[in-house]
Image: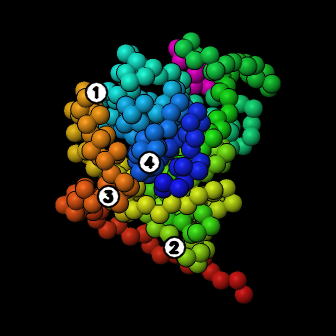
Amino acid sequence: MQEAIAEYVRDGMSVAIEGFTAFICFAAGHEIIRQRRRDLTLIRMTPDLIYDQMIAAGVARKMIFSYLGNPGVGSLHCVRRAVEKGIPAPLEIEEYSHYGMVGRYTAGAMKLPFFPLRSYLGSDMPQVNERIRTVESPYGDGPIAVVPPLNPDVAIIHAQRADVQGNTQLWGLLGIQKEAAFAARKVIVVVEEIVDEAVIRADPNRTLIPGLIVDAVVHEPYGAHPSYVQGYYDRDNLFYLNWDKISRDQGQTEAWLEEWVYGLKNRAEYIQKLGEETLERLRPGAAPASPIDYGAYT
């Protein structure tokens, strides 16, 4: 992880750490904080606790996003401090609906000039975001809102497994992972397991991201904690509740960052500090899928 972030994430870049509720790569976000990157544009549907932490650490100058909050709990207090008070630094925001962000990633992945969507007609959002514009449909059915393509400098995608070539398999709540990867200029894949190519080839429909677009593969077990990875560990809801209390105060937030990010060399130390009791609490029950036979060519 240290090598991947050092090589592909530089000051001033745009960075997308995606994953819709699940697969949020906190390990990568913490390494970006640890390497003291600055002036980043952070891109994400539903900025989670990871962007709250990164903004509290002063890495960002701008955030492009849809829906802002600590899911199921309340506000992201560090983001609010940055926007409302400029603490620790002012933060520019560019807001869309979920579908608006999906449209931007999709246009970026497909190399389209824009993406049309009807849901902004009648909304106040175009009044606060000049990048949401309106064009006349070429088919004569009236005006339609459009959003521009989104092409992050770097996308960081967490998944269950990949081979060493970067062929990456995911299952569960997929979100916008694939589109973000295809839209980005560079792609870092972070996985719970690195497996043989034969494992990937045996179940090709799970391969969401092909190795031909991947620039780095990082093996980082529990790299998405406190979010979850389907079949590997559950969401740490207690962490989300505790963060609400910690993040209300900048001093407490900085103390947490010092203890859990700056004070640790890597994710392995983070997991060791987290402790076996927490890992056991997050261990999921079994829910195996039915086996299938793809059939061999003869």
Instruction: Mark yes or no: residue 200 visible.
Output: yes
Q: Are marks 4 and 1 in contact (CB under 8 Å)?
A: no
Between 209 and 39, which is closer to the camera in this rendering? 39
Mark earlier in primary sequence (4, 1)? 4
* Earlier sequence position, callout 3 versus callout 4: 4
Which residue is disc 1 drawn over? Answer: 250
Q: Taking 43 as reference, is 224 above or below it?
A: below
- Which amino acid lies under the numbered mark 4 shown in the image of this protein? Glu
Image quarter (top left, top right, bottom left or bottom right) of the C terminus: bottom right
Task: Check if residue 144 falls in the magenta segment.
Answer: no
Q: Which residue carries the number 3 mark?
A: 269
Residue 46 visible somewhere in the drawing:
no
Q: Nearer the viewer, mark 2 or mark 3?
A: 3
Region rendered in magenta: 118-125
Q: Which residue is farthest bottom? A: 298
2 or 3: tag closer to the N-terminus? 2
Mark number, residue 39: none
According to the picture, the residue beneath numbered tag 2 turns out to be 195
Q: Disc 1 or disc 2, which is closer to the eye?
A: 1
Specify which label sits upstream in the sequence, 2 or 4.
4
* Magenta stretch contains residue 120: yes
Real-space Cα separation, disc 3 to disc 4, in angstroms: 12 Å
Three-letter amino acid code at the position of disc 1: Gln
Label 1 element class = helix
Element class at badge 2? loop
